[in-house]
Image: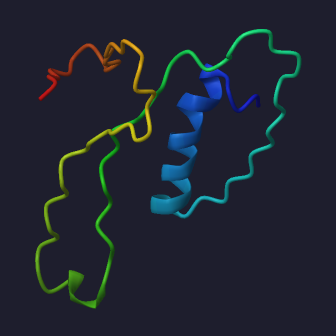
């Protein structure tokens, strides 16, 4: 997988979520493209995935805590660029930017 491709940018957060929250074993082979004549990174992607509360010994005695709402953030973006936002969600969802 080319780490600068759109497929990699959208797949890696999902794979990280599966590894960190569901305990999946994930192996990813990166195969970067060579010979770029232009800057290959044209877009930035982030997923807003729900947090999974950690299980502990008191989980059976009390109801589980409510998860915090999913959030996406973009650290270290270029300062001198015009950026736009596009939200890709299923059709049935009502989503807004705050």
Q: 60 above or below 16?
A: below
Q: Position of residue 52 (x, y in %)?
A: 32, 60
Q: Position of residue 11 (x, y in %)?
A: 58, 34
Q: Position of residue 46 (x, y in %)?
A: 42, 34
Residue extending farthest front: 80
Q: Is residue 11 left or right of residue 76?
A: right
Q: 52 above or below 35?
A: below
Residue extending farthest bottom: 57
Residue located at (18% from left, 47% from top): 69
Q: 75 above or below 96?
A: below
Colouring scheme, one of rainbow, by chain, secondary structure, one colour: rainbow
Image quarter of residue 67: bottom left
Image quarter of residue 89: top left
Viewer-side residue, 40 vs 10? 40
Image quarter of residue 64: bottom left
- The quadrant the C terminus occupies is top left
Q: Please state the total of marks drawn on the protein image.
A: 0
- The quadrant the N terminus occupies is top right
Residue located at (31% from left, 18% from top): 87
Q: 56 above or below 17?
A: below
Residue located at (35% from left, 18% from top): 88
Viewer-side residue, 43 vs 50? 43
Residue located at (68% from left, 17% from top): 40
Residue extending farthest right: 35
Q: Is residue 94 left or right of residue 46?
A: left
Q: Position of residue 75 (x, y in %)?
A: 40, 41
């Amino acid at each position: 997988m080319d780490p600068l491709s759109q497929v990699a940018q959208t797949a890696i957060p999902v794979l990280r979520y599966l590894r960190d929250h569901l305990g999946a074993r994930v192996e990813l082979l990166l195969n970067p493209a060579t010979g770029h004549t232009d800057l290959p990174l044209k877009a930035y992607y982030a997923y807003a995935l729900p947090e999974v509360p950690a299980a502990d010994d008191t989980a059976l005695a009390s109801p589980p805590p409510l998860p915090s709402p999913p959030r996406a953030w973009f650290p270290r973006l270029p300062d001198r660029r015009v950026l736009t936002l596009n939200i890709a969600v299923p059709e049935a969802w009502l989503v807004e930017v705050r």
